[in-house]
Amino acid sequence: MTNRNMAIVGYITIIGWAIAYFSYRNGKEKSSFVRYHLNQSLGIVLLSVALSFISAILLSIVPSLATLLYLVSLIPFVFMLLGIITAANETQRPVPVIGKWVEGKFNL
């Protein structure tokens, strides 16, 4: 699998991230490009989990916020698409909002 493909697959759900991570880890060449995008996609996954918990708690308290919370849950999906586009263009640009915060946080 090429570096570009590993970076793109890393954004596609947690299973795709695991496939890309193990391909990267078992590969002979450790690309900073792939590592960067694996960090960004892991940040998106963690954001998604956090938003799910927060949404579930808020939804149990205020059920009338269901539509708003549904729209908020689409934010990680949009970040994922932006990450895929960035990886497909073979650039290392951070994902909006959380990208700068995630850079260098995970030791992959």
Image (tube, rainbow, N blue to C red):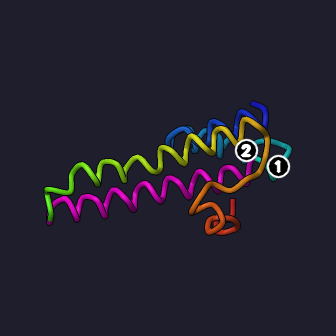
Residue that numbered label 2 is attached to: 24
Residue that numbered label 1 is attached to: 30
Q: Relative to 6, is 30 on the left or the right?
A: right
Q: Position of residue 76 (x, y in %)?
A: 47, 50
Q: Relative to 106, is 34 on the left or the right?
A: right
Q: Residue at 62% of width from left, 65% of height from top? A: 102
Query: Reading the chain from its start, which is encountered first: label 2 or label 1?
Result: 2
Q: Secondary structure at mark 2?
A: helix
Magenta span of residues: 34-61
The chief SS type of the magenta part is: helix
Q: Relative to 52, is 56 on the left or the right?
A: left
Q: Quadrant of the C terminus?
A: bottom right
Q: Relative to 26, is 100 on the left or the right?
A: left
**How many other residues sit within 10 Å of disc 2, few (<14), some (14-19) or many (≥20)?**
many
Q: Position of residue 37 (x, y in %)?
A: 69, 50
The three-letter amino acid code for the residue at tag 1 is Lys
Q: Residue at 21% of width from left, 52% of height from top? A: 66
Where residue 9 sits, quadrant-wise, is top right
Residue farthest along the right direction in this orientation: 29
User: In this figure, what is the number of numbered marks?
Assistant: 2
**How many other residues sit within 10 Å of disc 1, few (<14), some (14-19) or many (≥20)?**
few
